[in-house]
Image: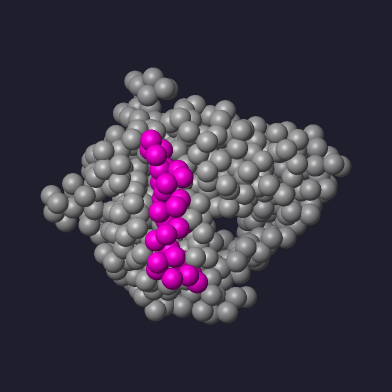
Amino acid sequence: MLEELRGISPEDRVEAFLDIWVSGEGLEFASEEAREAYRYRAGLLKDAILLKKTPDRVPILPLATFAPTTLAGMSGKQAMNDPDGLGKAWLKFVDDYEPDALGGMLMVMYAPVLEALDYKLYKWPGHGVPEHLYYQFNEQEYMKADEYDHFIQDVTDYWIRVWLPRTHGALGPLAGTFPVYGSMELPMSSPWLMTLGIPEVQDAFKALLEAGRLTFEWFQKMMPYVGQKVAKGFPESAGGFTKAPFDVLADSFRGTTGIMMDLFRQPDKVLKAVEVLTPLMINLGVSLAKVNRNPLVFIPLHKGADGFMSNAHFEKFYWPSLKNVMLGLIENGCVPVCFVEGAYNQRLEYLTELPPGKCVFYFDRTDMARAKEVLAGKSCIAGGFPVSLIMTGKPEQVEAEVKKLLNQVAPNGGYILGVGTALDDPKPENLKAFMEAGRKFGKY
């Protein structure tokens, strides 16, 4: 956790970390007016998270991925290959729409890095997806059903010598290396080091170094744009990222079919695997939030949604480890921001088990009126606006729907206005109507 939080009681760390973020301490601003605009916007979010009725209005947080570049006339392929174009598009987006916070710039990954690694986990524009579209997850069974013991006993070794070679084609030769533990004494070092000298393994390291070089150069180009966005008075909407342990296992290792069979064929190993992943996911979220001095930790939720599993399976396999990750983040002063993809109409009561005023549930297709009813006074809720209306509707329809949604969930605070899923291809007039309606009807 941040050093400034160590003397603060666990109950007060979240608010203290939010105060540090809202203050803008250590950030550079274009003017004093921009500094005050930053504090105002971040303050709106802080008050919503802490379940305080704001003195002004509901904060507005559009969840943008490719929307800024699409609106700037860039294809998906251009966005993933032109860092300067990407950064300029983001700056124009905040100028045009004035969101209360915005992240996502670095989520539009640099395509040359993926190409250098022969990355298998996603397809992206110009590489398995048409150039004008956006990246897509490529779910496969990257971990076999009989490999749980290796994963559980030594997840780091499994990750490096089994999973990475399968998901990054250029790193395939790492599967032929010996475990690193031989380095502990001189007589045992030579077998491990010998495998590192195999020409194909050397090529794998060269590919990894090239990917690192490209990513470093990309960051050097992108971070000034992130800084300019903040300098204009627009906070970053997330300081860190992590995942539900079950989703790590189900999304990127076993795949949907594999994990669903495992729930019946080897349930104890599934439980042990998510237990192994839990501290790793806490540390991932906390470490990034600490570096960025931003307590908001984004957590996309996938396979716990209604329809993926029964409540009994959710209660046994999904919720306990996710809850432990969230409690671990809160213990370190972080705010878990769960992006609840799909619907959680059958899961809402579980979400009441978190301490009040410490997290955000950003909903996609959950019944927002019921979410407000169940979580009022317990957790901040967000989202719920149908992205399809912004993509295909008319401005007057957007305005009417914003008004309706705010009437349902805004009273007494604890709500952040947002679209139900990530924006890639919005109609500009509809997005403008969404933002303006939020400011018009979201006043307290």
The image position of residue 67, as x and y in percent, is: 43, 67
Residue at the image point whose x is 54% and y is 40% from the top: 371
Residue at the image point whose x is 60% and y is 37% from the top: 348
The image position of residue 62, as x and y in percent, is: 41, 57
Left or right of residue 131, residue 258 in this image: right
Q: Pick whichever, 136 or 216, lies toward us.
A: 136
Quarter location, residue 200: bottom right
Reply yes or no: does residue 238 show up in magenta: no
Residue 226 makes an appearance in the image: no
The image position of residue 38, as x and y in percent, is: 24, 48
Identify the main secondary structure in magenta. Answer: helix
Quarter location, residue 73: bottom left
Residue at the image point whose x is 56% and y is 68% from the top: 135
Reply yes or no: does residue 394 show up in magenta: yes
Q: Quadrant of the N terminus?
A: top left
Please tell me whether residue 122 is drawn above or below residue 15 in the rendered image: below
**What residue span does the magenta drawing correspond to?**
390-419
Residue at the image point whose x is 13% and y is 49% from the top: 32
